[in-house]
Image (tube, rainbow, N blue to C red):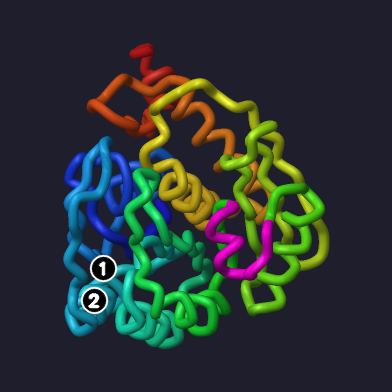
Amino acid sequence: MKHVLSIAGTDPSGGAGAAADCKTFCAHGCFAMNVITAVVSQNTQGVRSYMDVTPELIADQIDAVFEDISVDAVKIGMVSVPATIHVIADKLKQYRPPFTVIDPVMVATSGQRLLVPEAEESLKTVLLPMADVLTPNLPEAEVLTGMHIETFAQMEEAAKAIVAMGAKSVLIKGGHRMEDATDVFYDGTEFHYFKGQRLESTSTHGTGCSLSSAIAANLANGMVLADAVGAAKKYVFEGIAHAEPIGKGHGPIHHFYSLYKAAGME
């Protein structure tokens, strides 16, 4: 069994953040671990408030994991302030995990900003270059590059720009596109298109968290990069398609659909 670490904020309603990350790791047959960067009060209807964990405690959590258990991949989510970004980067340099997948969480689905403006530059210059895979959605890619992104050609240009900033590869998610939900993946050499069917569903809470976590788990399990991304996209699609109606807002995906199906519990 591979061991995968989430470094992210919380979600007491269980659909996003560290909760979604750990569910996704387990669904992929991995042992899930988590380091909390922020305590977030949120549910399917939105983010209410959050409190950042101190850099010292974040560092101590990371040390506690790496000094005891081997880590096969790391997924990084909510890092809202520069101090958090710097301490995580320092620890990644110290421990050098085999794979690091970064989801540059800037704004929650509900519209609540989760990255303070002064942290944007730190994210770009300190943490982004440590990503084996970066997974921005279209608005996040626009913030990172300063570009307007609408067409596939613009998605490709943005992907090249992000790799030029230091990320080894980038998946620009197309969920905000009006036409379809096609993602563009650039591995630093060539482009891969992962076409996505748009589902009429409100069960989209934590999709970005789950996608990046699935990529991390797939890499830990030995998949090659493009296959890891493609399998992760399929996993999230199935999770949305078979989600249970939970909560009054945007509910979570069904993280364990394939396991329920295999057990005859559809």
Q: Give above or below for 246 relative to 39.
A: above
- Residue shown at 43% from the left, 20% from the top: 242
Mark 2, Cα crowd under 10 Å, few <14 / some 14-19 / many 20+, is many
| Helix, strand or loop at mark 2 | helix
Task: Give yes or no for residue 147 being in the magenta stretch.
Answer: yes
Mark 2 is on which residue type? Ile
Residue 183: percent from left, percent from top: 66, 45
Q: Which residue is drawn at 32% across and 46% down?
A: 16
One can see residue 215 in this view: yes
Q: Please name the residue shown 59% across and 52% down the image.
A: 138
Up/down of 12 relative to 58, above or below? above
Vertical relation: 230 (above or below) 113: above
Q: Mark 2 points at which residue?
A: 58
Q: Name the residue located 30 percent from the left edge and 20 percent from the top edge.
A: 245
Q: Which amino acid does label 1 sit on?
A: Thr
Q: On the picture, is 184 further left or further right than 6?
A: right
- State the image coordinates of residue 51 (x, y, percent, origin top left): 17, 66
Check residue 205 for magenta coloring: no
Which residues lie in the magenta part? 138-148
Q: Are marks 2 and 1 in contact (CB under 8 Å)?
A: yes
Instruction: Determine which residue is flagged by label 1.
Output: 37
User: Looking at this view, is 175 or 61 the one in front?
Assistant: 175
Quadrant in which the C terminus is drawn: top left
Q: Position of residue 181 (x, y in %)?
A: 63, 36
Q: Is the magenta stretch mostly helix, strand or loop?
A: helix
Tell me, yes or no, if residue 96 can be seen here.
no
The one nearer the camera, 74 or 37, is 37
Under circle 1, the secondary element is: strand
Q: How many labels does the image show?
A: 2
- Whether 198 is drawn above or below 194: the answer is above
Q: Where is residue 76 in the image (x, y as percent from the top left)?
A: 41, 64
